[in-house]
Image (cartoon, rainbow, N blue to C red):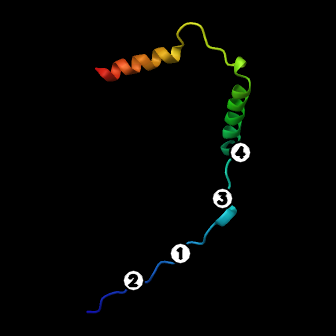
Amino acid sequence: MSARTHSRPVPAPRAGAATRLPWWALALPTLAFVALLALVLNPADAHATAGEPALTLLVERAQQLMAR
């Protein structure tokens, strides 16, 4: 009984530069960069909030829950 031979698979064609990104994949990092650059150039606009922000309380609560 003869054994069956397997042929090599045909490689898929390369797409090259045909891949496109959505518009927000470039817009969001650009917007974040511009916002951070504006804060660096004029740090007087970066005001601290009075009291404890909700984010700090949330992080502390998450730490307490993980410590149990």
Q: Hey, which quadrant is residue 6 in on the image?
A: bottom left
Q: Hey, which quadrant is residue 14 in on the image?
A: bottom right
Q: Secondary structure at mark 3?
A: loop
Quick one: quadrant of the C terminus?
Answer: top left
**Between 15 and 56, which is closer to the camera in this rendering?**
56
Residue at 70%, 39% in the rendered image: 30
Would you say the residues marked 4 and 1 are in contact, meaning their CB atoms lie under 8 Å apart? no
Residue 38: where, in percent of width, then height?
A: 73, 28
Q: Secondary structure at mark 1?
A: loop
Residue at 52%, 10% in the rendered image: 52
Q: Is residue 42 above or below residue 3?
A: above
Residue 22: where, in percent of width, then height?
A: 68, 47
Q: Earlier in the sequence, mark 2 or mark 1?
A: 2
User: Three-letter amino acid code at disc 1?
Assistant: Pro
Give the spatial CA distance, label 4 vs label 2. 44 Å
Residue at 25%, 92% in the rendered image: 1
User: Three-letter amino acid code at disc 2?
Assistant: His
Would you say the residues marked 4 and 2 are in contact, meaning their CB atoms lie under 8 Å apart? no
Q: Is residue 2 above or below residue 18?
A: below
Would you say the residues marked 2 and 1 are in contact, meaning their CB atoms lie under 8 Å apart? no
User: With 59 as the anchor, is 14 left or right in this view?
Assistant: right
Which-is-in-front pick, marks 4 and 2?
4
Tag 1 residue: 11
Give the spatial CA distance, label 4 vs label 1. 31 Å
Tag 2 residue: 6
User: With 56 as the anchor, is 43 left or right in this view?
Assistant: right
Give the spatial CA distance, label 2 vs label 3. 32 Å
Tag 3 residue: 19
Give the spatial CA distance, label 2 vs label 1. 15 Å
Tag 4 residue: 23
Q: Earlier in the sequence, mark 1 or mark 3?
A: 1
Q: Is residue 42 above or below residue 12?
A: above
